[in-house]
Amino acid sequence: MNTFAVVTGGGTSGHVLPALAVAESLVAAGHAKDTIHYVGTRRGVETTLVPPTGFPHTFLDIVGLQRGLGRRDLARNMALPFKLVRSLREATRLLRDLRPTVVVNLGGYGSFPATWAARRAGIPYVVVSYDRRPGLVSRLLAKRAAVCAVAFEGSALPHAEVTGAPVRSELLTLDRSAARDNARDELALPRDRFVVAVVCGSLGAAAVNDVVSAAVERLADRSDLAVFHAVGDRFLTSAAPVRDGTSGILYRVIGYEQRMPQLYAAADLMVTRAGAGTIAELAAVGAPAIVVPWPGAAENHQLDNAKVLSDRGAAVLIEQVDFTVERLAAEIDRFVADPRQLDALARAAHEAGAVHRSGRLVGAIERAAAGGGS
């Protein structure tokens, strides 16, 4: 059976999960699962997330440019040109074997080899850019793309078509209110407490973790609160101790949580970074959130992402310098005391997510595959 699409993007969950969302949406549109081939990296979280999905996949030995000046960073940067050449050759052979009708690029360094190979082979490709400020790979490849599927109006990319961001089908159809009690049971969270869920991508965020653990200490006597904290696997051994809620706050600590539909349904309030995929998911499901952009993101693009929601009253934006124990505790107290503010935040988020639920992205990919472009 011929391959319909190669879907490529990887390294972190911010690229892998949207790539899987695209793959799932193509299957939902009638394309056989074994005609959708995922291409990512050998070092990224995709090696854990992709195999269980059943999609055919290939992982290339490619790494991103390291911005640090440490010995390890310099060594990886010196190896980068050799890995890039080798991965381009592997991607070229792969596309020659698969003969895909279209390649879908989800951004990140892991998406470059397969998309560049498609460009050289004359295979139409789609650049999916869901950051408000497009990333480097998206900008490099956009000019020759059949279409650039973007999440926001006013994109600087050529051939831009507003399609919304790729979001997994199980989130697009999620009814948070209806699923709440069952989700809490599945996650072993109490039904009668105000639940704060903290998730900062697959890697976690040290600055956010520190504030949350300190806030848990400050709110330790609150028997009406539960905090579910995904700290990131790399921080799990140094995380603050759990609290069973017997005489005060319930504090659950894990490395990474894959059951995001359940967590979005179970949580009264989310605390997240502002990766584009996270912002799109919050809007698609209508989850009220405190969003703390990572200041180290390229060109501070997470701040722009967060403003997509905060500018329309659909999220609380707190920059990292202002994200303190006092501020977090005050926001939690505010929403516990006045659920109407929480409901207003959720409604505004859900309204902002209409474009992501529109189904336009699959249409753009299928037109590109048929040679229609934009």
Image: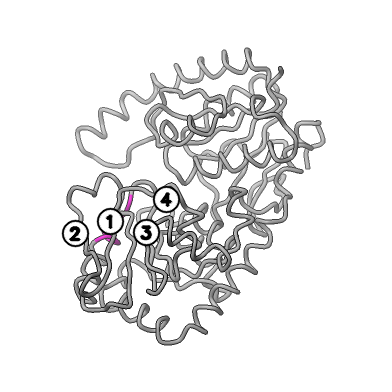
In this rendering, is residue 38 above or below 154? Answer: above
Q: Return the residue at label 2.
A: 240
In this rendering, is residue 232 above or below 23? Answer: below
Tell me, yes or no, whether the two marked residues, 2 and 1, touch with CB atoms within 8 Å. Answer: yes
Looking at marks 1 and 4 on the same chain, the residue that comes earlier in the sequence is marked by 1
Q: Return the residue at label 1.
A: 253
Q: Which amino acid does label 3 sit on?
A: Ala
Q: What residue type is labelled 2?
A: Ala
Q: Which of marks 1 and 4 is in front?
A: 1
- Secondary element under disc 3, as helix, strand or loop, is loop
What's the magenta bit mostly, secondary-structure-wise?
helix
Task: Give the residues drawn in magenta, as a range.
Answer: 204-209
Q: Does the magenta stretch include residue 205?
A: yes
Looking at marks 2 and 4 on the same chain, the residue that comes earlier in the sequence is marked by 2
Quadrant location of the N terminus in the rendered image:
top right
Residue in the image at 33% along x and 81% along y: 330
Looking at marks 2 and 3 on the same chain, the residue that comes earlier in the sequence is marked by 3
Looking at marks 3 and 4 on the same chain, the residue that comes earlier in the sequence is marked by 3
- Secondary element under disc 1, as helix, strand or loop, is strand
